[in-house]
């Protein structure tokens, strides 16, 4: 599904129209969302998370539109978000695979922490790291990296203020949050991370790692993990 966004901004005295396109595909054993984000004005694009047998459809969209995938941005290192990393870099060899340093060990030695996967994930090192407060540019689109540990030690989310958009990974879902009963989870850190994103504007669109889209405002009103009802 594609979600078009546009914004008129000014660079000096000249107006620039920012046109962002988001395409989503869901798949893999855990029904994980993968996202393709593109700045149509420049043709630059990125994949966010790479579930098994899921990203190829998004790569096809990028190739059809002549968009250049510059990054594979991994919100964290769990297997259901990293399985197809090689599919991305095979199609776009110059794409940089980025993850937080604390979750890179799961990329170097991939697999499930609680059961044996029915397939193999190729190991690799990151090309660079997603650090708190840093920014990633996808064309003219600027995404701020927010360090949000809890579901995993190196979980991050990506926030685009100009488009009121949060790519939330497994931090926040519609009506739920990411698991904190995994071997590498930290419930106390998760609470702090949720409080951090709850401070974002209520009209911020949330694109989660699992399930349908939502908004910060909707979750503050109805999500028991943000209202104190959990």
Image (spheres, helix red, strand yellow):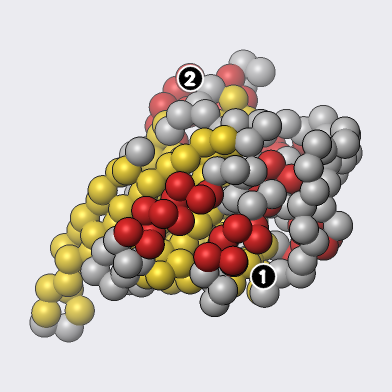
Q: Estimate the x, y position of residue 225 in percent, counting from the top left.
A: 61, 25
* Element under disc 2: helix
Q: Quadrant of the N terminus?
A: top left
Quadrant in which the C terminus appears: top right
Could one spot residue 148 in this view of the protein?
Answer: no
- Residue at horizontal 76%, vertical 69%? 125
Q: Which residue is mark 1?
A: 129
Q: Residue furthest bottom?
A: 12
Give the percent coordinates (x, y) of residue 154: 73, 55
Left or right: where 100 falls relative to 72: right
Q: Is residue 19 above or below residue 3?
A: below
Q: Residue at x 53, y 49 (%)?
A: 55
Q: Using the numbered discs, state the Cα–Cα distance from disc 2 to disc 1 in whole angstroms.
A: 34 Å
Crowding around mark 2 (Cα neighbors within 10 Å: few <14, some 14 to 19, many 20+) is some
Q: Nearer the viewer, residue 199 or 35?
A: 35
The relative height of residue 219 versus residue 130 in the rendered view (above or below) is above
Q: Which comes sooner in the sequence, label 2 or label 1? A: 1
On the picture, is 125 further left or further right than 115?
left
Q: Pointer 2: what residue? A: 222
């Amino acid at each position: 599904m594609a979600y078009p966004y546009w914004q008129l901004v000014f660079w000096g005295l000249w107006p620039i129209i920012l046109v962002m396109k988001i395409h989503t595909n869901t798949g893999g054993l855990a029904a994980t969302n993968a996202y393709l984000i593109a700045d149509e004005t420049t043709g630059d694009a990125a994949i966010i998370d790479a579930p098994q047998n899921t990203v190829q459809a998004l790569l096809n969209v990028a190739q059809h539109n002549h968009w250049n995938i510059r990054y594979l941005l991994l919100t964290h290192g769990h297997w259901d978000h990293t399985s197809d990393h090689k599919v991305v870099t095979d199609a776009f060899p110059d794409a940089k695979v980025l993850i937080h340093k604390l979750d890179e060990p799961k990329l170097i030695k991939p697999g499930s922490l609680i059961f044996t996967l029915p397939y193999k994930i190729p190991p690799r090192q990151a090309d660079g790291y997603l650090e708190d407060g840093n920014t990633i540019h996808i064309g003219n689109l600027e995404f701020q990296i927010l360090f949000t540990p809890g579901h995993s030690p190196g979980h991050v989310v990506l926030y685009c203020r100009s488009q009121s958009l949060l790519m939330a990974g497994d931090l926040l879902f519609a009506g739920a949050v990411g698991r904190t009963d995994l071997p590498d989870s930290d419930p106390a850190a998760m609470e702090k991370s949720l409080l951090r994103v709850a401070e974002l504007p209520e009209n911020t669109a949330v694109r989660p790692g699992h399930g349908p889209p939502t908004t910060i405002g909707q979750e503050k009103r109805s999500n028991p993990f943000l209202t104190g009802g959990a």
